[in-house]
Image (tube, rainbow, N blue to C red):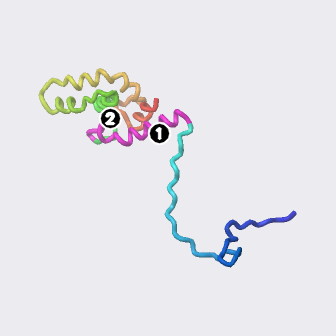
């Protein structure tokens, strides 16, 4: 049995003909960025999209910065995603002495979704719970 050794790139075309390449120091190169892996399934694609949405918008709705969404913060997010941005109305009534009708509307409209998203039943929504809810 014969063993063959193939050295890729060892032979080059030199000005005087074909010859062995002399080793030259390699030029420094920047590490190549890993290509983004394509989601393997529709479920993986939905999960990836949900993660991106949560990453991009979390701070806008977690007003108190606790790392969790209250029922009103969650409801405001859901209403905005449905095209009914109630944020300004809710904030205006929260600061004033006016009736809290916008907040009540948000809570009423989104309470079923809140209880579905709050899988551990602690009355607040974590990033993971929101991601799972959005990926459904």
Up-down relation of residue 35 to residue 60 (above or below): below
Query: Label 2: how many residues lie within 10 Å, few (<14), some (14-19) or many (20+)?
Result: many
Marks 1/2: CA–CA distance: 20 Å
Q: Earlier in the sequence, mark 1 or mark 2?
A: 1
Residue reaching furthest front? 16
Does 71 lie within the magenta span?
no
- Residue placed at 52% from the left, 58% from the top? 32
Give the residue furthest to the right.
Answer: 1
Quarter of the image where the N terminus is located: bottom right
Asked whether the beta carbons under mark 1 and mark 2 sit within 8 Å of each other, the answer is no
- Out of 35 and 106, give the one closest to the viewer: 35
State the count of labels.
Answer: 2
Q: Which residue is mark 1?
A: 48
Residue placed furthest toward the bottom: 16
Crowding near the residue tagged with mark 1, few <14, some 14–19, many ≥20 C-alpha atoms within 10 Å: some
Q: Is residue 53 highlighted in magenta?
A: yes
Residue 37, given in percent of the width and then of the height, sits at 53, 45
Nearer to me, 71 or 106: 106
Q: Which residues are magenta?
A: 41-64
Image position, residue 91 (x, y; %): 20, 33
Asked if residue 105 lies left or right of residue 3, the reply is left
**Which residue is depicted at the point 50% across and 55% down?**
33
Q: Is residue 122 above or below residue 24?
A: above
Which one is nearer the viewer's eye here, 15 or 51?
A: 15
Please, what is the dominant secondary structure of the magenta stretch?
helix
Between 13 and 73, the one lying in front of the other is: 13
Q: Secondary structure at mark 2?
A: loop
The residue tagged 2 is: 69
Where residue 118 sits: x, y (%)? 39, 29
Residue drawn 13% across the image and 26% down it: 98
Helix, strand or loop at mark 1: helix
- Quadrant position of residue 116: top left
């Amino acid at each position: 049995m014969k063993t063959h050794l193939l050295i890729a790139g060892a032979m080059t075309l030199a000005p005087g003909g074909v010859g062995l390449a002399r080793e030259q120091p390699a030029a420094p190169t920047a590490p190549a960025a890993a290509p983004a892996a394509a989601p393997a399934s529709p479920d993986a694609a939905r999960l990836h999209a949900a993660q991106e949405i949560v990453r991009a918008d979390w701070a806008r709705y977690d007003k108190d910065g606790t790392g969790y969404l209250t029922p009103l913060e969650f409801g405001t997010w859901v209403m905005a995603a449905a095209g009914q941005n109630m944020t300004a109305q809710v904030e205006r009534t929260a600061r004033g002495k006016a009736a809290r009708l916008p907040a009540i509307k948000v809570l009423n409209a989104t309470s079923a979704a809140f209880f579905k998203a709050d899988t551990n039943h602690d009355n607040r929504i974590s990033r993971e719970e929101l991601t799972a809810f959005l990926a459904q």
